[in-house]
Amino acid sequence: MPSRPPTRITSPTNPRVKDLVAMRRRRRRDTADEIMIEGYEELSLALDAGLRPRALYYCPELTRGAHELALVDDVAERGADLYELSRAVFEKAAYRESPDGFLATADRLPDDLDRLALDADPFLLVCEGVEKPGNLGAMLRTADAAGVDAVIAAGPLTDWGNPNLIRGSKGTVFSVPVASGKPEEVLDRLSAAGVRVVSLTPAATTLLSEADLTGPVALAVGSEKYGLSDAWLARSDVTVKIPMFGRANSLNVATSAAIAIYEAVRQRAAGRL
C-alpha cells in the first residue's frame, strides 16, 4: 500500500467526484488541460509509457486483489495525489458501467503537429475527419501492434483524451505518438518531410497490394460516412482501394486502416530481407 495515506472520499457530493463526472465533457477537459484515464490495463500501459498522473482515485473493493493494488504504490512514487473512494462513490465517478477500481487524471496529451518528431523513414497513419472515438482507439491499437511511428488526426472531431478513445485504444494512445492539425497543415508537414501520402478510397483504380508502401509513407483514411475529402485526395501521391466482393461498398474505417497497415508491414518486412 502507499507510503502516505490516501484521502478517503465517501460522499458522492464531494467536489472532486463532481469534477470527475464533469471530465467526461470535452469542454471541461480542455479548460483543465487534463484527461481522465480509467481502467487498470489502460493506466498500467500509460505508466509504462512514462505518464505521471496528477491524481489517482481507486476503490480496493472493485479491484482484483493485491497484485493490482500494487499499482497504487507505483503511482504514488510518481508524486500523484491519492484518493480512496467507497464503492458507491467510485461507481458514480467512473465513466464505465462496470468499473475495475482505477481512475487517474493527468496532463493533456501533447498533440502539436510541429512537435511530432519524424525519422528518415517514417511509417504513419493519418485519420481525416474520423468522428467516432472508438474507431480512433481501435486504429491506435493496430498502430501500436504494427509498429506505426505516429497517428495523426487531420481535422479532428474528437480529442485524444476522450474516455471512449482511451478505452478503445486499451491505453495505446499513451504508447503511440499522436498529433493533430488541419488537413492542409498535415499535408504541408508530410510534404516538407518527404513523406508520400497513400490514401484509401473506393474510387481508386489501384489496388492496395499494387502500391509501394515502403519508404517514408503515410496511409490515410477518412470519415466513417464520407471518406477522405476531395481536397485531401487531390494532394495525395497515390490513391488505393481494398478489393471487396460483397454488396456493401465500404469497410469499417478501423478495419480498412488495419488491412492497409499490415499490407505495409508485409512490404516493409520483405524489403528488409
Image (cartoon, rainbow, N blue to C red):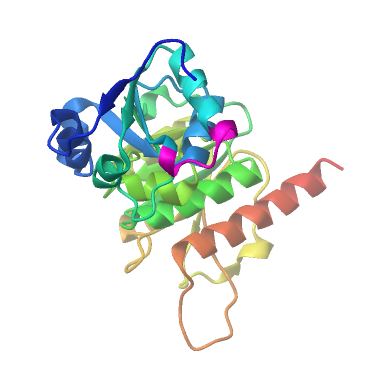
Position of 68 with respect to 164 (left or right) is: right
Q: Which residues are magenta?
A: 61-68
Q: Depth check: 236 or 136 in front?
A: 136
Give the quadrant of the C terminus: top right
Q: Is residue 128 above or below residue 109?
A: below
Give the overall secondary structure of the magenta segment.
Answer: helix
Which residue reaches farthest bottom? 247
> What residue do we see at 35% from left, 61% from top?
223
Q: Depth check: 8 or 50 in front?
A: 8
Position of 163 with respect to 254 (left or right) is: left
| Residue 158 % position (x, y) | 28, 47
Q: Inspect this view and state whether residue 118 appears.
A: no
Determine if the magenta segment contains residue 63: yes
Position of 257 with respect to 32 (left or right) is: right
> What residue do we see at 25% from left, 40% from top?
89
| Residue 90 % position (x, y) | 30, 41
Q: Depth check: 53 or 152 in front?
A: 53
Determine if the magenta segment contains residue 83: no
Q: Is residue 164 above or below residue 104?
A: below
Q: Inspect this view and state whether residue 216 appears.
A: yes
| Residue 257 % position (x, y) | 53, 58
Q: Quadrant of residue 14?
A: top left
Which residue reaches farthest right? 273
Q: Depth check: 177 or 221 in front?
A: 177
Q: Quadrant of residue 210?
A: bottom right
Position of 246 with respect to 155 (left or right) is: right
| Residue 94 % position (x, y) | 30, 44
Q: Is residue 24 above or below residue 112?
A: below
Q: Across the whole image, how many numbered discs are drawn on residues? A: 0
